[in-house]
Amino acid sequence: MSETDEYRTFPEAVRVLILERDEHRCQICGRLGPERGGDIDLEAHHIEENPDDIDRDHPDNGTTLCIPCHHLVTHRPTADDLPFDLDAVAAEVNLLYKDIEVLMFLYQSGPATTSEIIDATSCGARPATIERLWKLMSADRRVDSLDEPIIDKDAETEEWGAPEDIGQTARGKVPIGRSELVDSLTDELLRRLLDAGVTHSTLSELFDCPERATFYREKRAGALRVPLDDSSTPNGLADAEEFEQVVDGLSSMLGGVDDVHSNR
């Protein structure tokens, strides 16, 4: 980093003081530096370029970040750089800080695997990160102003990224093998039953899975869009009208079960 006014680093003594004050821990992702037995290099980041009440290089204007998080913070695109209204999406889909962090990382850095996203962000555990990615990829189901996903997944490389950066989308991909086929149709059935008003707890019993898993499967179905045989996807997995009839019948039956439960 050059020693210009814009990019000047902290003096060495101040940098050391900031890292010691923050206990050699990245203040975004929590990873530890070598001084604490970790394996990630840490840097002191200026919180503000021109603070009002203190000098730019005052320790109170500094925080400890690992190199990936520091890169994300200092180079992330702004909301104006995105091809959609981030505020509208965040409001309608209830995006959390970590969702936006992942979104900004992918638009700034390009396609990345799940492991690379975990390493570069504060998402944490792999299952939670994947659910977060399904949530972002399925946002266009819930936001009228979106005509394509805000992120996509590559069916060949399994990388996630902005739609224009993805070579072969996993959305609408015909499942390979019986197990994948059953999972895809079951996910879509679950998603449509939730849309029809059936509760997560009832579907947890119906599909013999933890209630928490119904949220994950709902997002996965919304993201992947199982191809049904209709005007937009001829020769799909199942006849769209027949599938909807199954949904209507089950939702009517299960809605009655929900009413019984709610009146107890």
Image (tube, rainbow, N blue to C red):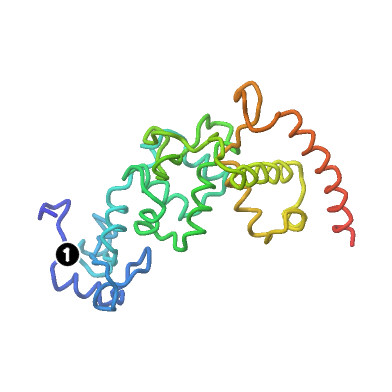
Q: Residue at x 30, y 77 (%)?
A: 23
Q: Mark 1 highlights which residue?
A: 10
Q: Is residue 2 above or below residue 144?
A: below
Q: In what quadrant of the picture does the N terminus appear?
A: bottom left
Camera-side residue of 123 and 72: 123
- Farthest left residue? 3
Q: Nearer the viewer, residue 190 or 44?
A: 190
Q: Residue at x 39, y 56 (%)?
A: 115
Q: Position of residue 154 (x, y in %)?
A: 43, 40
Q: Is residue 241 above or below residue 95?
A: above
Q: Residue furthest top?
A: 231
Q: Residue at x 55, y 40 (%)?
A: 176
SS at mark 1 in the image: loop
- If the image is split into quadrants, where does the C terminus sit? bottom right
Along the viewing direction, whichever of 13 and 173 lies nearer the viewer: 173
Residue 63 in the image: above or below residue 95: below
